[in-house]
């Protein structure tokens, strides 16, 4: 399949695919390159194709050396190259060699691609990527072991694109009244992945967006952030500006077309400043209509031991507050671990502090329906270790103790996470 993809893509220059792809304009200058174990691979030819919701991008040299990337989805955004569940794949074929390198050997590493340009009108695609791939030294004798290559600093610019996506998608509507003042989204982005449906609308310096963790037709409470949440930033250019989240209200999905990636609905409620330093904002007459969303794979995961008992997160809301990123790891047992680090987070070992300071944490558990007990991290009781920050995907580990208002202490150990903070 990989060989067929590579060579059929190369042949597109002389044998274009049939179908309603539209006329291809004069191509822009294309490039495709990546560092392979520190040596730069520069393709002589590159091409991309999207058919039936899957995109494949390939760079090939004249001697047959080739790098191929394939993922489920299309359009601007971050996508997984993990082979699991057929979400994606990345391969490398050396020159004059039929022994292919595959990234399926390295499922515990970050393998991703970010599309920064998906221009249907001009038929070009640009972006960045990275992955690790391995192969058996001898495919007929796997006992001889494997060899591995690291692919980083991968970039492709203005690669010729053929796509079956409608070049003129409908423009949706997103608007809401905040204390009676109408905010209309000028730029609207939306995506659906393992973390749920996310929609973001920007007007000048103001930005409002929401996340529904299990999107389907129906109503979702904004009372306690368990079903959905809305975030409002009055000034996205100022890291110190106030930030609001919903403390009450409802989001209704009235139309959801998974096949064509389109959603409509309405919302209303109360926006509360995170630290209570400003008056609440009444949110009324919120409408999202015919919003097109892309379907992407998410790399998010988190696990830990809570007093020795396994904790595995299933939803991963991310909140930006006054220059910090607050990452929430929640499971199906109404437990939540919140890690706080700066927006400009970098690799390093950081002693745990008391919330809401940088590199702090909380643990929350529902003790009865509608009742929660919160535990705050004990300063210097452990560490948050950031091991990797690549293309807005943060990877790390953590261990610390937390304490509630009655003095009860809980040990959180063996924590590890991967979280995409690009939203």
Image: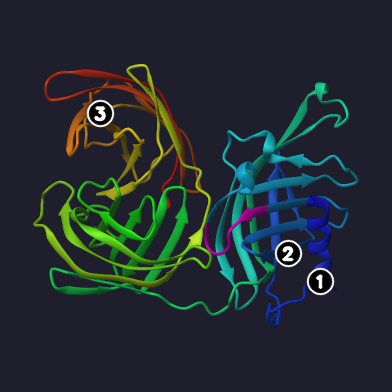
The answer to whether mark 1 and mark 2 are in CB contact below 8 A is yes
Q: Considering only vertical position in the picture, is 395 above or below 156?
A: above
Residue annotated with mark 2: 47
Q: Nearer the viewer, mark 1 or mark 3?
A: 1
The answer to whether mark 3 and mark 2 are in CB contact below 8 A is no
Question: At 25% from the left edge and 28% from the top edge, which residue is drawn?
Answer: 353
Residue annotated with mark 3: 353
Viewer can see residue 13: yes
Residue stretch rendered in magenta on the structure? 70-77
**In terms of sequence position, does the residue under pointer 3 or pointer 2 come before the other?**
2
What secondary structure is marked by label 3? Answer: loop
The numbered mark at residue 13 is: 1
Hey, which quadrant is residue 402 in on the image?
Answer: top left
**In terms of sequence position, does the residue under pointer 1 or pointer 3 come before the other?**
1
Question: At 62% from the left edge and 66% from the top edge, which residue is drawn?
Answer: 125
Is residue 393 or residue 184 the one in the foreground?
A: 184
Query: Marks 3 and 2, how far apart in space?
Result: 49 Å
Viewer can see residue 347: no
Question: At 39% from the left edge and 51% from the top edge, which residue is drawn?
Answer: 214
What secondary structure is marked by label 2? Answer: strand
Hey, which quadrant is residue 267 in on the image?
Answer: bottom left
Horizontal relation, residue 196 to residue 237: left or right? right
Q: Residue furthest right?
A: 96
| Residue 166 image position (x, y, % from top left) | 58, 76
């Amino acid at each position: 399949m990989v060989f067929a993809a590579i060579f059929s893509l190369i042949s597109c220059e002389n044998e274009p695919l049939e179908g309603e792809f539209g006329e291809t304009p004069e191509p822009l200058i294309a490039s495709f390159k990546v560092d392979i174990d520190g040596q730069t691979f520069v393709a002589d030819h590159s091409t991309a194709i999207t058919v039936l919701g899957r995109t494949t991008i390939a760079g090939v040299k004249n001697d047959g050396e080739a790098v191929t990337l394939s993922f489920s989805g299309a359009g601007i955004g971050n996508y997984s190259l993990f082979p699991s569940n057929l979400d994606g794949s990345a391969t490398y074929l050396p020159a004059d060699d039929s022994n292919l390198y595959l990234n399926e050997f390295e499922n515990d590493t970050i393998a991703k691609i970010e599309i920064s340009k998906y221009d249907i009108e001009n038929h070009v695609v640009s972006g960045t990527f990275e992955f690790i791939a391995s192969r058996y030294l001898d495919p007929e004798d796997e006992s001889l072991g494997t060899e591995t290559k690291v692919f980083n600093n991968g970039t492709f610019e203005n690669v010729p694109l053929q796509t079956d996506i409608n070049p003129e998608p409908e423009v949706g509507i997103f608007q809401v009244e905040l204390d009676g003042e109408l905010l209309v989204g000028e730029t609207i982005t939306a995506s659906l992945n393992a973390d749920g449906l996310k929609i973001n609308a920007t007007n000048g310096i103001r930005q409002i967006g929401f996340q529904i963790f299990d999107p389907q037709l129906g109503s979702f409470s904004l009372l306690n952030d368990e079903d959905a949440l809305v975030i409002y930033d009055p000034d996205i250019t100022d890291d110190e500006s106030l930030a609001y989240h919903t403390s009450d209200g409802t989001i209704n999905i009235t139309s959801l077309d998974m096949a064509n990636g389109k959603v409509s609905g309405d919302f209303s409620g109360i926006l509360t400043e995170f630290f209570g330093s400003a008056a609440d904002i009444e949110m009324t007459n919120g409408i999202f209509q015919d919003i097109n969303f892309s379907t992407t794979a998410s790399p998010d995961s988190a696990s830990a031991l809570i007093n020795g008992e396994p904790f595995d997160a299933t939803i991963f809301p991310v909140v930006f507050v006054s220059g910090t990123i607050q990452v929430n790891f929640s499971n199906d047992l109404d437990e939540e671990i919140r890690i706080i680090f700066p927006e400009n987070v970098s690799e390093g070992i950081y002693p745990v502090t008391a919330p809401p300071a940088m590199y702090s944490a909380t643990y929350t558990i529902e003790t009865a329906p509608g009742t929660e007990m919160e535990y705050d991290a004990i300063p210097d009781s452990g560490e948050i270790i950031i091991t990797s920050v690549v293309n807005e995907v943060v990877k790390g580990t953590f261990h610390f103790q937390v304490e509630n208002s009655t003095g009860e202490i809980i040990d959180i150990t063996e924590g590890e996470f991967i979280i995409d903070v690009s939203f």
